[in-house]
Amino acid sequence: MKIFSVALNLHDHNTYDGVWHNQRERETRFKHNLPYHAEAYAHQSDILNPTDYRLNGEFVKEYFKKKEDVLAFTYTYGGVRMCKNILPQDVFDYEPKKLFDYYFKDGIYYIDHHQSHATYAFLNSGFKQSDILAIDGIGSKYRCVFFDKDQNLIDLSDKLPIGWLWNHMSNLTGFGTLGASKLMGKVGYGKYSEYYYNVFETIFDGPITEKKQKHFAHINLDNINDLAFTLQKFTIDKIKKHVYPLKSCDNLCIAGGVAYNGYMNEEFTKHYENVFVPPAVGDEGQAIGTYQHADYTLNNNIHISKTFAGKNYEYIGNEKVNYKKVAQAIADGKIVGWFQGKSESGNRALGNRSILADPRNPNIKSIINDTIKMREDFRPFAPAVLEEHYKEYFDTRLPSPYMSRICKVKSDKVPGITHVDGTARIQTVNKKFNEKFYNIIKEFYKITGIPMLLNTSFNCQEPIVETPEQAIRTFKRTSLDMLVINDWVLRK
């Protein structure tokens, strides 16, 4: 059966046909795709106009018309309001007990939001058996579920609404309801606060609802750094209390928005032998997981999605790229926009839509934040390190190909990628995963003796660039020194 998959979310709306992962924000140029609630964007609300992009029932109908043999979908609470009159009403009564339960009627295939997250992580892991944690702020029926090695669903929504708490604290501290990653950047600057820990315990003992929590306004915000640090500790403590006892094998897969929490993912490597976190762990990967689920149950096929699942773009320039010269330019202090082939699935630049710089430069974080990314100065940058060398520089046990774990930095030679708390969110790179990206890092290694580059997403206050035109526009309006598009170089 031919399958077309769509995730109906208030943000991160995306589709998948088995080849192309259409992450809608890359086309609309709105971060998180839909400016449904201006507060989600904190201080950017003044530049957003919700009428610029309409995700409504008529728009969704277009996808339903495109269905082949099977239209597979999932949704987030609130997202389905845009097409409630289109869907079979018994869809909303569906409640899974096992990972591969499903609803299928008249060509409409449906699974729960958290089943989609879990399937995406599990099938891409290659594990024959695995525990699976699907954890985020909100889904359709759940906030957090755990599947054991026998694929039984255990609902942890009431015990572990961690994503919900991060979203509310992010909004409370001025980063918007979708700014949890920014709040996580504050963790390294803070220290433990018993006051905030008790506040979080009190919140967990109260009602967990989507309504505005007016009583949160009484929380003392004198030290946001301490709030962030304590929230991270609270997160790890609750994970240990509610998830660790459920362990049923040595493998763990993690997905859902909270799986972007690199501190948490690294902690899991101390409890599980193998930990797998895929690249598009948030709602932006939902269409892939839903497709994989339908393909597995209906076609008896295990579909492994590509990390680079965007579109290819043609571009012809005037100067052919020379990797040695580009690496030398980076070693000399230049900052390079790096655009190659198909774009990555997910919110991490993994070597095809990246900004590259010298990790030895202690001032590089401020330079990039101030002159290129135009973002908060406290936010750190990640290293992309040759896989064969990562243990020389980082205190971690497993490779991290998708930039999913935060660990301690063992060397003082790379201050540009070392956060204030002595950590980094590492990406390990091998030749099979991304040969061109591996080669540019290798050239830098030959010149400097440092087997890594600073790697951050290619964007400036918007989603990651998708097309050559978007890359060139960002190149021209920022302080990037050089731009590489496939086999060509552009200079200023």
Image (spheres, rainbow, N blue to C red):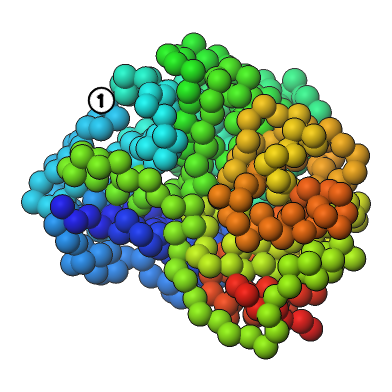
Position above or below: 21 against 320: above
Pick the front one: 253 or 195: 253
Which amino acid, mark 1?
Lys
Q: Please state the horizontal and vertical placement of residue 269, each as a whole percent of the image.
A: 61, 24
**Can residue 19 be seen by looking at this rendering?**
yes
Q: Residue at x 43, y 72 (%)?
A: 53
The residue carrying mark 1 is 97
Q: Please state the horizontal and vertical placement of residue 307, each as a whole percent of the image.
A: 49, 52
Position above or below: 144 against 150: below
Classify residue 398 as left or right of residue 79: right
Q: Residue at x 81, y 42 (%)?
A: 419
Q: Residue at x 56, y 50 (%)?
A: 433
Pick the front one: 249 or 100: 249
Task: Tell me the quarter of the picture where residue 196 sits.
Answer: top right
Classify residue 343 as left or right of residue 363: left
Q: Please state the horizontal and vertical placement of residue 422, each as a whole percent of the image.
A: 83, 35
